[in-house]
Image (spheres, rainbow, N blue to C red):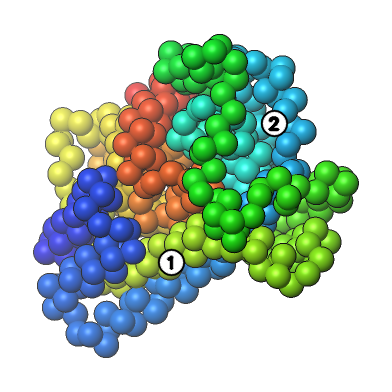
Amino acid sequence: MFLGVVGFIMIFVIVYCLIQSKANPIPIFITVPLLAAFVCGFAPEAVFGFVKKGVTTTWSTAVLFLFSIVYFGLMSDVGMFDPLVNFLVKKAGSNIILITVATAIIATIAHLDGTTAGTMLITVPAMLPIYKSLHMRPVILTCLVSAAIGVMNLTPWGGPTARVGIILNTDVNGLWQELIPVQIAGFVMVIAFAVYLGVLEKRRGAGVIATGKAALLSEDMEGVESAADGGDLDAMKRPKLLWFNVFLTAGVILLMCFTKIPLYGAFMIGLALALLVNFRTAKEQANAIKVHASAALSTPMILLTTGVFLGVLNGTKMMEAMANILINVVPSFLGPHLAIVLGMLSVPIGMMLGTDSFFFGFLPLAIGVADKFGVSAHDVSMAMLIGKDFCILVTPHNATTFLLIGLAGISIKEQLKFCTPYLWLLSWIMLVLALVLGIFAL
C-alpha cells in the first residue's frame, strides 16, 4: 500500500511540475524518483541499480532522436521540403482545414507499419514547415499525429493488440479482425477531428495576416541563422541536389521499415551521406550540425532521464502496488460494468503506468476482478485496449512523447495541456463506436 501511495504522489508531483513549468524536465525526472525511492527505504546501491536498468530502456530512443532531428533539420535547411511546402501553400491558400486533414491522412498512412517513432519521423518534418508558413500552432500537428496513431495502433503489429493477445492466450489476428470495423470508424472520426482543429485554427487567424496573404513566418526560425555562425539560410539551400536528398530520405525510411537495422542506425547512415554530399568542407558540415545542436542535445538528455523514473517505478515495485490500489478502489456497484468503466479510465491510468505495465501488470488484475462480477476477460481487454491507445503520446514518461514534441519544437506542457483532453474524449467516442459495433458488451 505504502509503495503505491508514494508512486501516485511521485507521478502527481512530476506531472504537476511539468505542466506548471516549475523546472526543466531533466532535474524533475532525476530528483523526484530518487527522493521517492529513498523515502521508501531503498539503499543507494539498489536505487542506482534501478537507475542503470531504467536508462538502458531509453538510450536507444535518445540516440535515435539525436541523429534524426539533425537529419531532418538538415533536409529542411537544404530545401528538400520546399517544393512540397510551396505546392501545398499554393493549393491550400488560407484553407487551413485542407492542411489538417492532409496531416491526419499522412499520419494514418505512415503508421501502417505500426512504428510510432517512424510515423512521427515521416509526418512531423514534412508538415511542420507548412504549419509555420501558415501560422498554425505545431501542437495541432502533434495532436493529429497522436489521434491517428491512437486508431492505427490497433493493428497486430502495432504492439498493444499483440500484448492483449498474449494476456488472453488467443490469436492476435482474430482480435484484430474484430477491431477492423472500429478502426474504420475511428479513421472517419480522426478526419472529422482534423476538420474541427482546422476550423479552430482558422478562427485564430491562421493562414492569413492583415494583408490577407499567406503568412510566411521566417521569424519562427527562432534564431537558427545566428546559430549557423551568422550565415544566411538561403546559402544552405541545395536545389540541384533535391532529388538526391529525396531518394536518400526515402532510403532511410525504407531501411527503417524493411530491415532489422536499428532506427538510429538508419539515421546515422543517412546523416553521414547527407553531410558529405551537401557540404564539401569540414567547416560547412560542422556549421550545418551546429544549427540544430540545441534541439539535438536537450531532448535526448530528457529521454535518458525518463529512464531514471521508469527504473525506480519498476525496480521498487511501485507499479504493481499502484495497479492493486486502482483495482481495489473500484466501487462494487460498478462491477458488472467494469469493461466500459476501465475503458473510459484507460487514458489517465495508461498515462501513469505506461504501456507494458498497463497491459502486463494492470490488465491481468482487472480481468481477475471483472471475473468476480461475471464480466468476460475479452470485454475488459477490448475496452481497455481501445481506450489506452489514445494516451501513448501524452504519457509523460514515454520516450516517444519527447521524440514527438522535440520534432515539433513544443514543450511537454503544451502537449499535455492541449492534447490530453481531446485524446481522452476521442477514446470515449471510440469506446461508444465499439459498443455499437458489438466489439464488447456494456
The secondary element bearing badge 1 is classed as helix
Amino acid at circle 2: Val
- Local secondary structure at mark 2: helix
Q: Dividing the image into 4 quarters, which one contains the N terminus?
A: bottom left
- Examine the image and state in which quarter residue 182 appears: top right
Residue 357, compared with residue 310, is above or below; it is above
**Residue 99, position as x, y percentages in the image:** 61, 23
- Which residue is at the front of the view, 426 or 78? 78
Q: Position of residue 87 (x, y in %)?
A: 75, 25
Whole-angstrom CA distance, mark 1 to mark 2, is 31 Å
Disc number lying in front (1 or 2): 2
Q: Who is closer to the viewer here, 389 or 290? A: 290
| Crowding near the residue tagged with mark 2, few <14, some 14–19, many ≥20 C-alpha atoms within 10 Å | some
Q: Residue at x 72, y 56 (%)?
A: 256
Q: Name the residue carrying label 2.
A: 85
Residue lying furthest bottom: 45
Residue ID for mark 1: 301
Front position in the image: 411 or 257: 411
State whether residue 379 is above or below residue 188. Answer: below
- Give residue 149's position: percent from left, percent from top: 54, 38
Q: Which label number is shown at residue 178?
A: none
Callout 1, which amino acid? Answer: Met
Q: How many marks?
A: 2
What residue appears at the point 27 percent right and 80 percent down from the top-left corner?
Answer: 47
First-in-chain label (1 vs 2): 2
Dot 1 surroundings within 10 Å: few (below 14), some, or many (20 or more)? some
Tell me, yes or no, if residue 147 can be seen here. no
The vertical placement of 34 against 99, above or below, is: below
**Is residue 312 visible to us here?**
yes
In percent of width and height, residue 142 lies at: 49, 37
Viewport quadrant of the C terminus: top left
- Give me the residue at 11% from left, 64% from top: 2
